[in-house]
Image: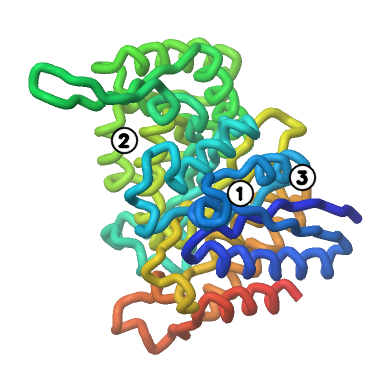
């Protein structure tokens, strides 16, 4: 029996709706397995800007550091789009990752059997199944490199710098190799080594680290080819490791081929003993906020990752995943995962709260 302290950052848009559903699911897990989850709410993103003038108040950073794990909804919205780059809601994400030392982002992409028809892929491809994990480097690369504007021969120029050290590449590579060892022992490294010097160092370092993992098969793909192969043969992938920028883009592609970005969880991890951060891959979706239309399953499945990776509760995590699968098999769907009209008879449309309640009921 354990007691766990979770920092909750509901954020903006649909964030409060999906994090509330996940809290109810975690409470149900606690009731069933005898654990206690204590939730402390903190501000970050647009709502924090409105309240404090900053996207990431120092109190939020302190609260997250003092927790066992962090549950994040989503941040951002059009009302903050005109703010300077360092004051936008999204800076809260970069700030949290940096402050907590979260250098590895794990994004599983699984095509659940009941949602096969929701995948935009040809049925002959989706029938082969999709079960892969992206390992995205999270605190380096172009998102954290020097940036600015200057006057050039053709007027104003803007620049962002891609920079990686050997240490940063090695630690994310080891995270990916370790994960591959727990799965099907196949790692694909994504880069652009034919053009970028940072990618050449990336590939050299991954190859060097591979010598310590002779039991894991390693291959390499240029990012443009990887984007094509994810559509053509997604079943050929097990674990993929990529830079911050490439991992950001490709993992969203993986999200869509599995049926909906509303189904994909993620975990951001640092060194052992530091709190991990768990969030859905999707954004704040301000166009549907407050309308009970959002899919809470990505955030609920992020909660399952929290149980497994931060708390070591593998049995409890499996129970949540099984509950989600049971709800999908029973035909319940939020709008984003509804199938074509000819299949509508076997589906039951539900909203955010009802979908969360169904998972809670399945857990009981």
Seen as rendered, the residue at the extreme left is: 154
Left or right: 156, with 345 as reference point: left
In the rendered image, the quadrant that contains the C terminus is bottom right
Disc 3: which residue: 68
- The residue nearer to you, when weighing 160 against 103, is 160
Label 1 Cα neighbours within 10 Å, binned few <14 / some 14-19 / many ≥20:
many
Query: Residue 284, can we see it?
Result: yes
For discs 2 and 1, the disc positioned in front in the rendered view: 1
Disc 1: which residue: 278
Disc 2: which residue: 226
Compute the Cα span from label 2 to label 1: 26 Å
For discs 2 and 3, the disc positioned in front in the rendered view: 3
Compute the Cα span from label 2 to label 3: 35 Å
Seen as rendered, the residue at the extreme right is: 1
Label 3 Cα neighbours within 10 Å, binned few <14 / some 14-19 / many ≥20:
many
| Image location (x, y in percent) of residue 31 | 83, 69
Residue drawn 53% across and 45% down? Answer: 54
In the rendered image, the quadrant that contains the N terminus is bottom right
What SS does tag 3 mark?
loop
Q: Quadrant of residue 176?
A: top right
User: Which of the two labelled residues, at mark 2 and mark 1, occupies the earlier sequence position?
Assistant: 2
- The residue nearer to you, when weighing 104 against 78, is 78
- Evaluate if marks 1 and 3 touch, with contact meaning CB atoms under 8 Å apart: no
- The residue nearer to you, when weighing 21 against 114, is 21
What SS does tag 1 mark?
strand
- The residue nearer to you, when weighing 175 against 103, is 103
| Image location (x, y in percent) of residue 52 | 57, 50
User: Which of the two labelled residues, at mark 2 and mark 3, occupies the earlier sequence position?
Assistant: 3
């Amino acid at each position: 029996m354990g007691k766990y302290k979770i920092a909750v950052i509901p954020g903006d848009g649909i964030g409060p709706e999906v994090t509330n559903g996940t809290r109810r699911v975690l409470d149900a897990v606690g009731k069933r397995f005898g654990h206690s989850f204590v939730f402390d709410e903190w501000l970050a993103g647009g709502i924090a800007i409105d309240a404090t003038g900053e996207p990431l108040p120092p109190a939020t950073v302190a609260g997250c550091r003092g927790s066992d794990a962090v549950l994040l909804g989503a941040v951002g919205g059009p009302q903050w789009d005109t703010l300077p780059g360092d004051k936008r809601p999204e800076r809260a994400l970069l700030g949290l990752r940096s402050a907590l030392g979260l250098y590895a982002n794990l994004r599983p992409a699984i095509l659940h059997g009941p949602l096969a028809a929701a995948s935009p892929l040809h049925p002959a491809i989706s029938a082969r199944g999709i079960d892969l994990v992206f390992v995205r480097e999270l605190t380096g690369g172009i998102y954290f490199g020097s940036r600015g504007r200057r006057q050039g021969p053709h007027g104003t120029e803007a620049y962002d710098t891609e920079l990686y050290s050997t240490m940063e590449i090695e630690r994310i590579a080891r995270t990916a190799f370790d994960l591959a060892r727990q799965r099907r022992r196949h790692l694909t490294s994504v880069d652009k080594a034919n053009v970028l010097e940072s990618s050449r160092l990336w590939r050299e370092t991954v190859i060097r680290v591979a010598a310590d993992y002779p039991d894991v098969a390693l291959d390499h793909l240029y990012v443009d080819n990887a984007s094509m192969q994810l559509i053509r043969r997604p079943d050929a992938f097990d674990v993929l490791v990529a830079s911050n920028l490439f991992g950001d883009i490709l993992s969203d592609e993986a999200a869509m081929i599995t049926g909906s970005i509303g189904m994909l969880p993620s975990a951001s991890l640092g060194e052992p003993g530091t709190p991990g951060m768990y969030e859905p891959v999707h954004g704040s979706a301000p166009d549907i906020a407050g309308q009970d239309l959002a899919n809470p399953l990505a955030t609920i499945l992020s909660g399952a990752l929290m149980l497994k990776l931060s708390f070591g509760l593998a049995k409890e995590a499996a129970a949540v995943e099984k509950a989600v699968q049971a709800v999908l098999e029973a035909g319940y769907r939020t709008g984003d995962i509804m199938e074509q009209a000819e299949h509508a008879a076997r589906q039951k449309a539900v909203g955010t709260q009802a979908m969360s309640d169904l998972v809670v009921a399945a857990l009981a």
